[in-house]
Image (tube, grey):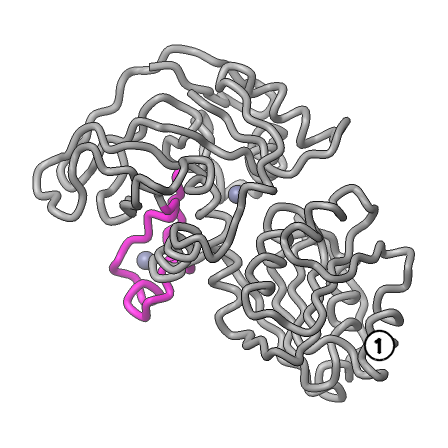
Amino acid sequence: MKAVVIRAPNRAFFRDEADPTAGDGQVLVKVALAGVCMSDVEVMKGTRPAPYVKYPVIPGHEWCGTVEQVGSGVKRVAAGDRVAVQGHNFCRACSWCSRGETNLCASYNEIGFTLPGGFAEYVAVRADLAHPFAKTLPFEAAAMVEPFACVVHGAQRARIQREDTVAVVGPGTIGLLAVGWAAMSRPARLVAVGLDRGNEAVARRMGATHYFTVKDEPAAKVREMTGGAGADVVFEAAGSEAAVPLALELARRGGTVVLAGIAGGSRRMFLESDLFALKDLRVDGVFAYTTDSFERALRMIESGQLDVKPLITHTLPLRQFEKAFELLSNRPEPVVKVMLRP
Ligand SMILES: [Zn+2]
Ligand SMILES: [Zn+2]
């Protein structure tokens, strides 16, 4: 089969690889589409922390396809099923897994990082990680389930009421999906905050009622529109250390802040030490997702509650993966999600 193989940082090839087959308890999936994520760019550049990648690797963790072959002992999934695949191959045995916190499994092993991923014609995966979906759901929407699962997982502790003001910091794929998620609860105000206005139009299409850049003094603006209070719920997905204090500042006293962004490189920030207590803030960090969050994310997209199509700005053949990486790294034109088609 043809696949993208990153042998080492900055050494990627589109080449022939041995066809995988479905082992016991596995299914072989023919890849329909795979989204490119900034973490794929990190794998390419060699900036992903060492425990979270194993070279050589076939990247691709936001993908879906059709089951081609079923290994022995597999009952849930059949050949011909269309499936979205969750990436974390949690061990099912460690103390985190036994608490149901499979996203925090003690042995990190993820499709597209330490296991072969979706930038290929075929991937053999554990059957319990493959989630069948209806034929009416287009593949491009199903490939967005993986990033949306992170939002669903992080947002489960943040309840949005009709009269609420919600702010989302960082309008990339995750942030825009968070806007879409928040819009489903129809809050009174849904504010997106970005570095520039590049993704304003798509943020509004996903349901944002207001859009500010960081230069617009967004926290002051949000206080102004909420009688001096601030946002009830803030979702941060910016991936920069400056976004964290901004997210905390945007929240009202007694508000909830969900931090999903990863700035990388062990960045540091300075915060007023009394901020959390004085504001009675609830701050949740979020790392990846569980099977349950993935399943809920899939059903929200499958049922049409969330339309993810506005986020897909480019679709390229797999062999043009370098162009996809280049689009995401340099952003010469508006880009949110680039899909690769094997
Ligand atoms: Zn991703
Ligand atoms: Zn585990």
Question: Which quadrant holds residue 258?
Answer: bottom right
User: In the image, 27: left or right of 96?
Assistant: left
Callout 1 crowding tier (Cα within 10 Å): few <14, some 14–19, many ≥20: some
Query: Residue 47, how many percent across, how many down?
Result: 63, 37
> In the image, what residue type sits under mark 1?
Arg
| Residue situated in front as seen by the camera: 61 or 295 | 295
Q: What's the residue at 18%, 43% (across, down)?
A: 77
Q: Nearer the viewer, residue 264 or 81?
A: 81
Between residue 139 and residue 173, name the one nearer to us: 139
Measured as percent of width and height from the top left, residue 27 is found at: 21, 36
- In the image, residue 180 sits, relative to residue 134, either above or below, namely below
Q: The C terminus is located in which quarter?
A: top left
In this image, 38 relative to 318: left or right?
right
Which SS class for mark 1?
helix
- Residue 1 is at least partly visible in this image: yes
Residue 98 shown in magenta? yes
Residue for point 79% across, 65% down: 246
Instruction: Please report the bounds of the magenta region as a residue range.
Output: 86-111
Give the main secondary structure, helix, strand or loop, of the magenta stretch. loop
Answer left or right for 92 relative to 278.
Answer: left
Classify residue 246 as left or right of residue 188.
Answer: right
Please identify the quadrant where the N terminus is shown.
top left
Identify residue for label 1. 223
